[in-house]
Image: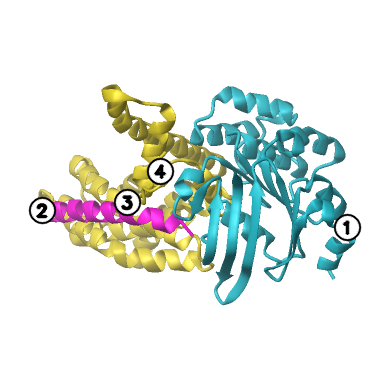
């Protein structure tokens, strides 16, 4: 079964077309990595799949539900890790995660478990604004997987993370998590290594859509020229 | 899980009930009770977060209170009078409270818009109206604190007649006004916060909608602040305020989902 099915997706911001004619299919458990220069439409694609933006044309199905008609049925099954951590700076990591846990009807033990996973227990009660960007990103990873989502939408998920932190979060958002993933990346080597399917975007249009095994790092590099 | 329900409110409830595995008569009872309880619980969670963020940042309430007290001082000197009463006193009180409230309205959704709280909320399987209720109650709390500071300050700085005898009725009139400000303020703040000109758009939209509350509030308050023979607030103005609160409460409830969605 396709976890994500997109046919002829278009999305505009005013007059500007951010996405146009994007089609793709992703099976359960697979990883789609989206490459493309800044402004190519990667984040817009993630936000449409997350049901935060409505498609202006085309058919989008996420986890078997048509978007936006059945968006209500998908919410709570998606984990989004975007450029913003979606956490309140004045609250601590623990308070933020407990807040999200209650929104998703998740037990408080899960919060403690995740704080331990991302090694934030020691500073879990400090306001987020006093933590480093890497620590905030670790808290954001914990927030994204708190409710054990079936689909992860990750926008440059390892940005701000040092190698040790990358190892910490990989069991949660990496291939080992076993979740269906859509990842936006600028790292051809790392992105290709974890991709099953590669989508290249340029000016909102698909420039490349192929199985990762058939794509070379050079082709990815071409997208940025 | 129904795949065809078009209404998000009904659908959210149906989904959660199905998830809980409710069956039979007990299940049907639970089907009604569970989403409602869950929504109330989400409102509590959102409200707690709201008040916690305000306690930590102190961005709204101190500014609102300081603005009100400063305005009374300005009126004191601008009118060149030591005391006011009746219509003038009621007008000064309500206009000052209205503008002070606008400071809180303008800040109501800023943390959510700037720090991604909207997106996080939209991704959660909860009813959108929970945020409306939580924000409106939070704004109501801010207004109560504002009035706890501003009304005694008004009594000391400007008001001629004693506030003490009018206080029970005044609290009732203020409460009716606060409900309307909370409903309209939350609706307008949700609309304005996603625009680039939110600081301008909020007051521009809110002030015309809040004028009937100022009129009703001031007319109902005026008899309470008459020197010598304070009267009762006119029932028709109280009824007007109540009706206005109800109408805008319903409008806010009906529109809020659409304001949060793309």
Q: Where A78 falls versus B226 (above or below)? A: above
Q: Residue A148 at what x, y percent from top left? A: 60, 33
Say which residue label 1 marks.
A217
Which hue is chain A drawn in? cyan
Q: Where B17 falls versus B214 (above or below)? A: above
Question: What span is in magenta?
Answer: B236-262
Q: Who is closer to the viewer here, A79 or B81?
A: A79
Disc 1 from disc 3: Cα separation:
52 Å
Which residue is depicted at the point 82% across and 35% down? A167
Which residue is depicted at the point 71% across and 30% down? A123
Same chain assignment for discs 3 and 4: yes
Q: Residue B49 at what x, y percent from top left? A: 50, 38
Helix, strand or loop for disc 2: loop
Determine the chain carrying the residue at label 3.
B
The answer to whether the residue labelled 2 contacts the one labelled 4, judged by CB atoms less than 8 Å apart, is: no
Label 2 packing within 10 angstroms: few (<14), some (14-19), many (20+): some
Helix, strand or loop for disc 1: helix
- Label number found at residue B127: 4
Q: Residue B148 at what x, y percent from top left? A: 35, 42
Which of the two marks, 4 or 1, is nearer to us in this view? 1
Label 3 packing within 10 angstroms: few (<14), some (14-19), many (20+): some
């Amino acid at each position: 079964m396709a976890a994500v099915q997109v046919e002829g997706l278009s999305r505009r911001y005013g007059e500007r077309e951010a996405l146009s004619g994007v089609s793709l299919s992703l099976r359960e458990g697979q990883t789609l990595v989206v490459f493309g220069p800044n402004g190519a439409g990667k984040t817009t694609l993630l936000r449409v799949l997350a049901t935060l933006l409505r498609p202006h044309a085309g058919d989008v199905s996420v986890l078997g539900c048509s978007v936006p008609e059945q968006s209500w049925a998908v919410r709570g099954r998606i984990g989004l890790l975007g450029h913003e951590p979606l956490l309140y700076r004045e609250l601590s990591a623990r308070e933020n995660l407990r807040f999200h846990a209650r929104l998703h009807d998740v037990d408080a033990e899960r919060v403690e478990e995740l704080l331990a996973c991302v090694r934030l227990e020691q500073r879990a009660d400090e306001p987020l604004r006093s933590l480093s960007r890497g620590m905030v990103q670790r808290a954001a990873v914990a927030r994204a997987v708190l409710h054990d989502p079936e689909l992860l939408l990750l926008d440059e998920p390892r940005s701000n993370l040092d190698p040790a932190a990358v190892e910490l979060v990989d069991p949660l958002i990496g291939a080992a998590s076993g979740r269906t993933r859509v990842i936006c990346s600028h790292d051809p080597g790392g992105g290709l290594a974890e991709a099953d399917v590669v989508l290249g975007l340029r000016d909102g249009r698909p420039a490349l859509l192929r199985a990762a095994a058939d794509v070379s790092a050079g082709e990815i590099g071409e997208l940025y020229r | 899980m129904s795949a065809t329900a078009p209404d998000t409110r009904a659908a959210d409830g149906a989904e959660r009930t199905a998830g809980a595995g409710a069956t039979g008569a007990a299940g049907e009872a639970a089907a009604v009770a569970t989403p409602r309880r869950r929504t109330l619980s989400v409102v509590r969670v959102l409200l707690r977060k709201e008040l916690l963020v305000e306690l930590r940042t102190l961005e709204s309430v101190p500014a609102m209170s300081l603005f009100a007290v400063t305005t009374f001082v300005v009126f004191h000197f601008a009118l060149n009078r030591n005391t006011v009463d009746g219509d003038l006193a009621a007008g000064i009180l309500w206009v000052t409270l209205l503008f002070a409230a606008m400071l809180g309205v303008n800040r109501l959704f800023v943390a959510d818009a700037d720090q991604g709280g909207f997106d996080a909320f939209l991704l959660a399987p909860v009813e959108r109206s929970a945020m409306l209720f939580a924000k409106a109650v939070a704004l109501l709390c801010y207004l109560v604190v504002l009035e706890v500071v501003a009304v005694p300050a008004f009594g000391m700085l400007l008001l001629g007649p004693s506030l003490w005898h009018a206080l029970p009725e005044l609290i009732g009139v203020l409460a009716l006004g606060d409900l309307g400000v909370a409903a309209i303020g939350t609706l307008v703040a949700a609309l304005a916060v996603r625009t680039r000109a939110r600081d301008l758009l909020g007051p521009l939209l809110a002030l015309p909608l809040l004028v009937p509350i100022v009129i009703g509030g001031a007319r109902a308050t005026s008899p309470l602040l008459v020197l010598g023979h304070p009267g009762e607030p006119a029932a028709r103005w109280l009824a007007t305020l109540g009706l206005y609160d109800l109408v805008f409460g319903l409008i806010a409830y009906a529109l809020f989902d659409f304001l949060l969605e793309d």
